[in-house]
Image (cartoon, coloured by chain):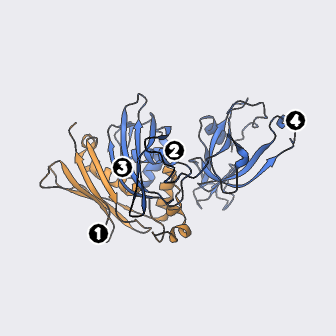
């Protein structure tokens, strides 16, 4: 996405500052109510559903579905005149909150109700890039899988937030100082898989895994996970797809490797 | 040297599955949408397979230590779904005929395996 001379977001408020700071780091965050569990956007000081003030920030996987969309043919102000026609969409993120965004990418007018999109960040003249939707294209089916192809690489920092959520699930899993628990490698693998292989048909089933965790996962380090299709096989009317992943440290050394066998739903 | 892996158990509630969906970004409706899941061959919501797989890694680390974990090749199948309300427990036993190989499992409260496979220690 190229820089644009569009109006930039207003000065963040106390409620929205964490959201914009996350945008600047390429992360999409939202609030979840600790009392009723409801996700909400835009950020507020209270839960719009139950009015509790116990709201926590969570990170979104940046994948969602177009709820509705419209194409703007006539610019509302001169600032947008270079842009028309452009597409605006309401996007329901998988975590359960809704955002309004532009649809960008090669063919925004291909957007339909139900289209799957990924949220990317578009730079502008201000300090905070804007989250915008990109269409994910045709459904990834058994027929279209290309064994040998790398479908994506996902880089993330092993931060305290990740560790905190792990502890909430597995409070007994205490890592060595300065590290995150080894099994977090499965989470890194699954997250990279979710982002790389999109859009997937609903209802895929994980049949089995071979896995090795080769080295400690250092707290605060950056890990890049590569996702590759390594095989597909039709057997007893089931569509088996083999997906291999490699988690690599900043120097490219392998931290964990896995091969997942999935039964693909379409 | 011990011949059994230290058991590690997890009680699975709907909130557990939602928290796991959040940490992995895996919102497959078979895990989070009761209506969708009811219409699939699974017949209802199932937990993410790797949520139970993680217990096995924890059990290996707790019993054999992290150095051995880094030399372990885990090869498992997800053989039975994990449902809301299940308590699952990871464990394993060293194979008498092959000292470097463990039969490993995660079982539900009825004692049925939900994960079964092997863990093999390879040379450093």
- Same subunit: marks 4 and 1: no
Q: Secondary structure at mark 1?
A: loop
Query: Residues at badges 1 and 3 in contact (C-beta under 8 Å)?
Result: no
Q: Secondary structure at mark 2?
A: helix
> Marks 3 and 2: which is nearer the front?
2
Q: For the point 12% across and 55% down, which residue is it? A: B96
> Marks 1 and 3: which is nearer the front?
1
Residue under pointer 2: A196
Q: Secondary structure at mark 3?
A: loop
Residue under pointer 3: A173
Residue under pointer 4: A78
- Same subunit: marks 3 and 2: yes
Vertical comparison of A84 with A40: above or below: above
Vertical comparison of B92 with A197: above or below: below
Instruction: Point out residue A201 in the picture as x, y percentages from the top left corner.
Output: 54, 57
Rendered shade, chain B: orange
Instruction: Point out residue A160 in the picture as x, y percentages from the top left corner.
Output: 48, 41
Chain on which label 2 sits: A
């Amino acid at each position: 996405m190229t820089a644009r001379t569009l109006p930039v977001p207003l000065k963040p408020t106390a409620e929205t500052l964490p959201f914009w700071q996350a945008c600047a780091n390429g992360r999409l965050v939202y609030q979840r109510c600790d009392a009723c569990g409801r996700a909400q956007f835009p950020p507020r000081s209270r839960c719009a559903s139950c009015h509790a003030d116990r709201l926590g920030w969570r990170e979104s996987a940046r994948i969602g579905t177009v709820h509705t969309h419209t194409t703007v043919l006539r610019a509302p102000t001169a600032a947008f005149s270079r842009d028309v026609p452009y597409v605006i969409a309401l996007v329901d993120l998988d975590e359960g909150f809704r955002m309004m965004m532009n649809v960008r990418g090669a063919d925004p007018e291909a957007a339909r109700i139900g289209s799957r999109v990924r949220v990317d960040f578009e730079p502008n003249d201000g300090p905070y890039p804007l989250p915008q939707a990109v269409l994910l294209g045709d459904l990834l089916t058994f027929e279209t899988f290309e064994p040998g192809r790398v479908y994506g690489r996902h880089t993330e920092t092993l931060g305290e937030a990740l560790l905190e959520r792990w502890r909430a699930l597995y409070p007994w899993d205490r890592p060595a100082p300065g590290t995150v628990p080894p099994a977090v490698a499965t989470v890194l693998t699954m997250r990279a898989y979710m982002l790389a292989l999109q859009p997937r048909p609903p209802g895929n089933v994980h049949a089995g895994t071979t896995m090795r965790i080769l080295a400690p996962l250092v707290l605060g380090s950056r890990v890049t996970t590569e996702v590759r299709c390594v095989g597909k096989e039709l057997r007893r009317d089931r569509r088996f797809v083999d997906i291999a992943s490699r988690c690599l440290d900043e120097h490219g050394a392998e931290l964990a490797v896995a091969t997942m066998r999935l039964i693909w739903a379409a | 040297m011990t011949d059994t892996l230290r058991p590690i158990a997890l009680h699975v509630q709907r909130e557990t599955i939602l928290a796991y969906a959040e940490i992995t970004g895996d919102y497959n409706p078979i895990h989070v949408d009761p209506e969708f899941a009811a219409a699939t061959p699974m017949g209802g919501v199932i937990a993410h397979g790797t949520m139970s797989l993680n217990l096995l890694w924890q059990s290996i680390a707790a019993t054999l230590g992290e150095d051995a974990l880094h030399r372990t090749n885990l090869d498992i199948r997800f053989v039975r779904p994990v449902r809301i309300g299940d308590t699952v427990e990871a464990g394993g036993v060293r194979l008498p005929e092959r000292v470097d190989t463990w039969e490993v499992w995660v079982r539900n409260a009825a004692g049925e395996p939900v994960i079964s496979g092997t863990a093999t220690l390879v040379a450093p």
